[in-house]
Amino acid sequence: MPGSQEGQEAAIRKAAYLIWLREGCPEGRARLHWDMAIADHARDQHPAEQRPGHDDQTPDEERILDGRYDVNIPAMLTKDVPGG
């Protein structure tokens, strides 16, 4: 279908921009944000295809060690903080 590749690229670009905003607009991380957006887009396109051995119950700490981007960083930062 004509234009679908452009539409996908636009969606990835928007997602990368939103990741950049969410992280506080840091400089020098454009490639990381782009890769994160591509991974999110691929996961959205093929939700049934997950990496073997990984499910929604995988702790965030293990996800980080595996190089995964689907981590709830704010929850991790406040997990051991009283009142967090």
Image (cartoon, grey):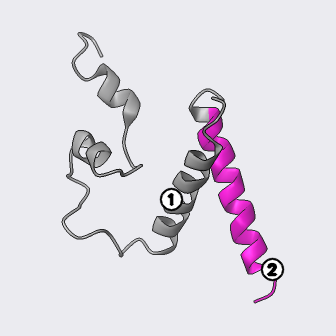
Residue 20 vertical placement versus 81 (above, below): below
Between 39 and 1, the residue placed more toward the observer is 39
Q: Count residues near mark 1 (Cα–Cα under 10 Å), then give few for <14, some for 14-19, many for 20+.
A: some
Span shown in magenta? 1-21
Which residue occupies 37% across, 38% down? 72
Q: Which quarter of the image is occupied by the C terminus?
A: top left
Side of 24 relative to 78 (left or right): right
Disc 2 from disc 1: Cα separation = 20 Å
Which residue occupies 35% across, 50% down? 67
Numbered disc 1: secondary structure: helix
Residue 40 numbered tag? 1
Q: Is residue 20 magenta?
A: yes
Q: Position of residue 55 (x, y in %)?
A: 23, 60
Q: Amino acid at mark 1?
A: Asp
Q: Principal SS element in the magenta part?
A: helix
Q: Quadrant of residue 47?
A: bottom left
Q: Count residues near mark 2 (Cα–Cα under 10 Å), then give few for <14, some for 14-19, many for 20+.
A: few
Circle 2 is placed at which residue position? 3
Between 33 and 79, the residue placed more toward the observer is 33
Residue 56 numbered tag? none
Residue 26 vertical placement versus 53 (above, below): above
Numbered disc 2: secondary structure: loop
Q: Is residue 4 magenta?
A: yes
- Pick out the residue farthest to the bottom: 1
